């Protein structure tokens, strides 16, 4: 949208009219600041007020936070639109910007139902700041793509209709319509990186390069195309790498992957977390995985930690596993399990059974099993074997990955080991032909 043009609702929302017609509820993220005030005013002119809800998040970070909430409620009432306020806790001393953002989007996601639309007031100057900020952070094509104009959020859809509009155009609209808004004093604090960019870096750029927002937006668009190309190449490559769903995550064939060019290997490392809906790793993590895991000895078991996940290698496969905070399983841990119910294990996994004929554990009328965990030195004899072996050797034979060996549940009956997880049933405890048996299912979603 040309800098000289004035904002009109038809120009802003024309491309989204078909979405509005399908939506019974349209939410506007409404802080009460200038940008969101203009967005709410424009939305009010384009759709029926009864379908609009001004959604205010009170972060509680300013002494004026309650006054801003009251002002937002008053403005919503003047426009005859619905109003919702949600209070979130962002009291941590460090990284409050990120905490506030996560809390805000958490509310948005929980609020949106199917076909709901959320409008946010990000504009062209915000886009320029984001791209420059990500450039200074060393981001790749994803970060350099900037703020997306639209994306799914929860069950609904997030739109940013002002992304092609500059801050000066928004201010002219607010002045022309005599709008009032709240001022957040934290926007003046240049100790925050984005405020420093806005106040100290971008003004000299704007003096030297007219329409810098458009130039930066063009870079963001080109980066988005690069990101889409990388994703397309990843999709082709991953199809040839024997992607498997594993306990706690996924794995791919490291041997086949090693035949690719280095740049494609790194692209796979980078985009693999998206398969688990996790954040993409920074460049240093990609390099560490490439150097430490893909080129490790075949008998090594290295790992590289990333945000909420860990990369590991075992038997020529590269694993990506979710990580969660969990309680430790001590040597004394044991659980009495009524096997007709699902048992949640201390490490977040679960056990449940399936009634079968001629398979699984032969239980008869016994209702309870005892669940224990490894102490070390245990032996057993899997069904059909001539001799017993240590669990250590059996785990190697059954290719149980090393990171599960301390937490696999051992099932006892009358103080005798009858089954090991869902890997095998011990000799003498297997259901015979025509007998009722219990098939064990051991599930884990993360380490």
Image (tube, helix red, strand yellow):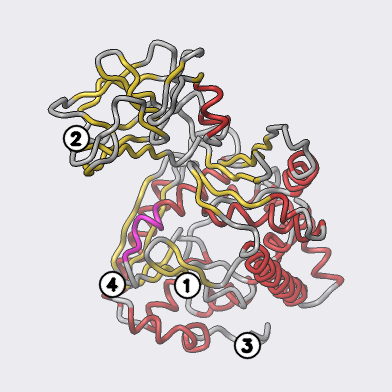
Q: Nearer the viewer, residue 59 or 330?
A: 330
Q: Circles 4 and 2: CB distance less than 8 Å? A: no
Disc assigned to residue 39: 1
Count of numbered marks: 4
Q: Quadrant of residue 75?
A: bottom left
Q: Which residue is mark 2?
A: 340
> Of tags 2 and 1, which is closer to the observer?
2
Q: Circles 3 and 2: CB distance less than 8 Å? A: no
Residue drawn 44% across and 12% down? Answer: 331
Question: Quick one: label 2 or label 1, which is nearer the N terminus?
Answer: 1
Q: Circles 1 and 3: CB distance less than 8 Å? A: no
Question: Quick one: label 4 or label 2, which is nearer the N terminus?
Answer: 4
> Of tags 4 and 1, which is closer to the observer?
1
- Could you classify mark 1 by the number of other residues whose Cα lies within 10 Å: few (under 14), some (14-19), or many (20 or more)? many
State left or right for residue 1 relative to residue 47: right
Give the secondary structure at mark 4.
Answer: loop
Q: Circles 2 and 1: CB distance less than 8 Å? A: no
Q: Is residue 421 above or below residue 176?
A: above
Residue drawn 23% across and 44% down? Answer: 356
Q: Nearer the viewer, residue 93 or 347?
A: 347
Give the secondary structure at mark 1.
Answer: helix
Task: Find the distance from the CA under tag 3 to the CA under tag 4.
Answer: 28 Å
The prevailing secondary structure element of the residues shown in magenta is: helix
- Could you classify mark 3 by the number of other residues whose Cα lies within 10 Å: few (under 14), some (14-19), or many (20 or more)? few
The range drawn in magenta is 107-113
Q: Nearer the viewer, residue 59 or 134?
A: 134
Residue drawn 64% across and 57% down? Answer: 271
Question: Quick one: label 4 or label 1, which is nearer the N terminus?
Answer: 1
Q: At which x and y percent is residue 389?
A: 50, 20
Q: Is residue 326 visible?
A: yes
Task: Find the distance from the CA under tag 4 to the CA under tag 1.
Answer: 15 Å
Q: Which residue is mark 4?
A: 80
């Amino acid at each position: 949208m040309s800098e000289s043009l004035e904002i009109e609702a038809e120009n802003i929302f024309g491309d989204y009219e078909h979405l509005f017609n399908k939506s019974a509820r349209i939410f506007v993220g409404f802080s009460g600041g200038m940008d969101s005030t203009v967005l709410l005013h424009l939305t009010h002119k384009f759709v029926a007020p009864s379908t609009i809800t001004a959604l205010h998040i009170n972060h509680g970070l300013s002494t004026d936070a309650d006054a801003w909430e009251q002002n937002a409620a008053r403005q919503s009432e003047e426009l005859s639109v619905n109003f919702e306020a949600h209070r979130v806790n962002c009291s941590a001393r460090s990284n409050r910007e990120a905490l506030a953002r996560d809390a805000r989007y958490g509310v948005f996601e929980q609020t949106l139902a199917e076909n709901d639309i959320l409008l946010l007031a990000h504009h062209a100057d915000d886009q320029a700041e984001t791209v420059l900020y990500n450039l200074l952070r060393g981001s790749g094509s994803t970060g350099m793509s900037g703020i997306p104009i639209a994306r799914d959020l929860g069950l609904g859809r997030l739109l940013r209709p002002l992304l092609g509009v500059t801050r000066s155009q928004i201010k002219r609209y607010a002045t022309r319509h005599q709008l009032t808004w709240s001022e957040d004093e934290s926007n003046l604090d240049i100790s925050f990186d984005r405020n420093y960019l806005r106040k100290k870096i971008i003004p000299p750029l704007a003096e030297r390069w007219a329409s810098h927002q458009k130039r930066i937006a063009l870079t963001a668009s080109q980066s988005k195309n690069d990101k889409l190309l990388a994703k397309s190449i990843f999709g082709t490559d991953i199809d040839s790498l024997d992607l498997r769903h594993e306990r706690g995550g996924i794995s791919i064939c490291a041997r086949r992957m090693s035949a690719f060019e280095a740049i494609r290997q790194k692209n796979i490392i980078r985009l693999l977390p998206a398969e688990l809906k996790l954040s993409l790793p920074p460049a240093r993590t990609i390099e560490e995985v490439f150097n430490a895991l893909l080129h490790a000895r075949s008998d090594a078991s290295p790992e590289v930690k990333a945000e909420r996940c860990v990369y590991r290698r075992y038997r020529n496969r590269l694993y990506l596993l979710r990580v969660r905070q969990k309680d430790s399983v001590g040597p004394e841990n044991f659980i009495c399990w009524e096997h007709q119910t699902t048992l949640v294990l201390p490490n977040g996994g679960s056990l449940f059974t399936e009634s079968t004929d001629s398979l699984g554990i032969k239980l008869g009328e016994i209702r309870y099993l005892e669940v224990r965990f490894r102490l070390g030195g245990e032996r057993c004899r899997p069904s059909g074997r001539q001799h017993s072996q240590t669990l250590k050797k059996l785990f190697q034979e059954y290719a149980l990955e090393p990171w599960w060996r301390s937490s696999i549940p051992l099932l006892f009956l009358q103080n005798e080991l009858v089954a090991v997880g869902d890997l095998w049933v011990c000799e003498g405890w297997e259901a015979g032909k025509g007998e009722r048996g219990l098939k064990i299912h051991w599930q884990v979603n993360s380490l």
